[in-house]
Image: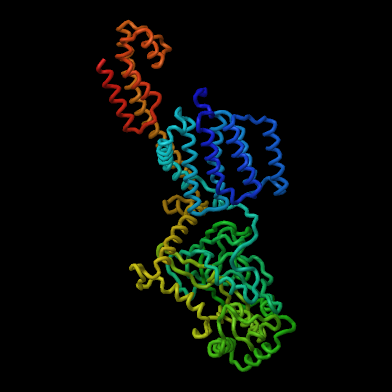
Amino acid sequence: MQAPELNIQREGIIPMLIAIQAIVLFPLWFEIPVWITGITLLLLATKWLTYKFEVKLPSWLVLIFVFSALAGVFLYFRTISGRDAGVGLICLMYGFKLLESKSYRDAALTLFISFFIMVMAFLFNQSIAMGLYLLVAMTAILSGLVALNSIQGVKGIKHLGRISGVALLQALPIMLVLFFLFPRLPGPLWAMPDSSQGGTGISDSMSPGDIGSLTTFDDPAFRVKFEGEIPSASDMYWRGMVFSNYDGLTWREGARSPTRTANIPSYEPLYSYRVQMEPNKSRWLFGLEQLAESPKGTFLFNDFTWRRPQKITSQFSYAAEAVRYEYQGVALSEFHRRVNLQLPATGNAETRQWSQELYNQSGSTNDFIQRILNIINQQEFRYTLTPEVLEDEVVDGFWLGTREGFCEHYAGAFVFIMRAAGIPARVVTGYQGGEYNPYGDFYLIRQSDAHAWTEVWIDNQGWVRIDPTAAIHPTRVEADLRNRANRRDDWFSDKTIGFDLPQDFLQKLRMRWDAVKSFWDDSLMSYGQEQQNDWLSKLGIRSNQWRYLGYALVATLLLSGLTLGFWLLRKSSRRDQIEKYYELIKAKLVKFGVEIPDHFGPMALLELLSAEHTELHKKFATPIKYYIKIRYQTESTHSADNEWIKRFKAQVKKL
């Protein structure tokens, strides 16, 4: 039965509930529509005004507002399901629940609901900063529960934080066990559909300037941790898209279809690694060349690329292997030969003729390729982010005219020249290189590492990677691009600047932070079924041995129950001693002729002594008040509580 003194009209309780709801909703206000944010703020203000001026809103009026809000969400989103519509509706109902709260039960329910609404912020933002903020929000909710269930309410606020912190620490072991051992669903918990369509990174087509525009973006694309041998940075070509169709300006994907490992040439594994991809709103994955067996839940296509059924809208991790194919005796199918020789019927006639003449002078395909690379290296071809814009006859204008461009210019022109000479070739886009982070032992690949290269089919060698951009002489690389690369190479130099700080102190600090962020994203936010199985396998528990998880959970619950039981028994034992001394007080009073009814509590006993036994009241009032303080009203620390008990026992012994 609810104690009458625990109603929510006590001073400070409702303002506390309003403040807690504001703390919980704060991160969501930046994600939900402005009109929903405005309504939740209005509901909080209305609740404060009704409390301040003791105004009671009619239930029918609140009900009208609730249905109006529900209709508004449906009209705005055209649904009440999904992430955005669902979160918006829940925020509104959360506000209405507080508005109509009148009793202790309503307030307690609002606070318990707050725990669930609080974690909805992770559906939008899974950063470390958000995790720390939600920890503060959780502490606020716990403090609210303590205040709501305390006779002193918010007056005992100096003790609320301590009690809440102790409760968090007590729950921490169970939280950790449940997090790591409780069976997980496939994929991370926070992988919810995202209605936004924009994304940063490699696109599904390539025109002059597309990849060059990414060099100014230092945003992470993905992180890679190798297991065992590691290739050199110059050999790190992270394959993503393959373009076979060309319309004279833009390269696009050609005909492709999922394939099986049994339908590809034999291969041997070279490197094992794990990728942690950032959200990019695309379906393709990136892997170290060459790609073979696709990661779990993805598909391998016949152009040796990987795809997911869904867009990558949250952190996504996968394990993979780089392989070396054996193409000896493997012939290119007529279909793939035709696709990778396709050129527009007209256009760029000068480059076509130039290519055919040079090929006729070459002794083999390899000789022809080497001649092209030598021309790029020895003649005035320049690598720049600001080439002259070409609208017509793009290949002629670049190869025989301006001779300046970014990687997509060189890759596109090189494939055109190969095809004009009758050699199957295609464009590959992805990322090249990687920045090693020694603090996290992984390589960070940024959007600025976006790159385009080519593949040429050579009999008995298969698809051979050719990077024409790498053939450019270093003296003809734009200074800004050289400085960008050199700046990363010098990060671990011993040079110093003022105040005896390392020259690149901030860069190293950023790398440490990125290592922490990588651990947060991969080990916590992306912790799903696959990561759980990997972690348990290290403990010797295979995926078909789930009963061990049950044993561990049962053992944890039993241990927690025994610990709690021991604590309660110990506390009860201490209380039993207090009751024993209180019974001594009553026994002494009975000896003095005081008749104490069985239903009398200590307050009633004090009133009886004060009214009918004045002398005894003077003698017994102090120990009885100590008992009341200890038994009913203590909000002190453990050490202070023990001090009151010592004083109480001493007073009883003096009687």
Direction right: furthest residue: 345
Side of 26 relative to 601 (left or right): right
Direction top: furthest residue: 593
Residue in the picture at 41% in, 41% down: 169
Q: Relative to 19, say whether 270 is above or below.
A: below
Side of 518 relative to 302 (left or right): left
- Figure colour scheme: rainbow
x and y percentages locating residue 599 in the rendered image: 43, 12
Frontmost residue, 44 versus 649: 44
Residue in the picture at 60% in, 68% down: 202
Frontmost residue, 251 versus 326: 251
Residue 266 visible in the snapshot: no
Q: Relative to 548, say whether 566 is above or below.
A: above
- Which quarter of the rendering shows the C terminus? top left
x and y percentages locating residue 628 in the rendered image: 37, 21
Direction front: furthest residue: 53
Q: Relative to 453, say whether 286 is above or below.
A: above
Residue in the picture at 39% in, 10% down: 608
Q: How many marks?
A: 0
Frontmost residue, 41 versus 463: 41
Residue in the picture at 65% in, 89% down: 355
Q: Quadrant of residue 426?
A: bottom right
x and y percentages locating residue 290 in the rendered image: 54, 71
x and y percentages locating residue 158 in the rendered image: 41, 36
Residue 488 visible in the snapshot: yes
Side of 181 relative to 250 (left or right): left
Q: Quadrant of residue 167?
A: top left
Direction bottom: furthest residue: 361
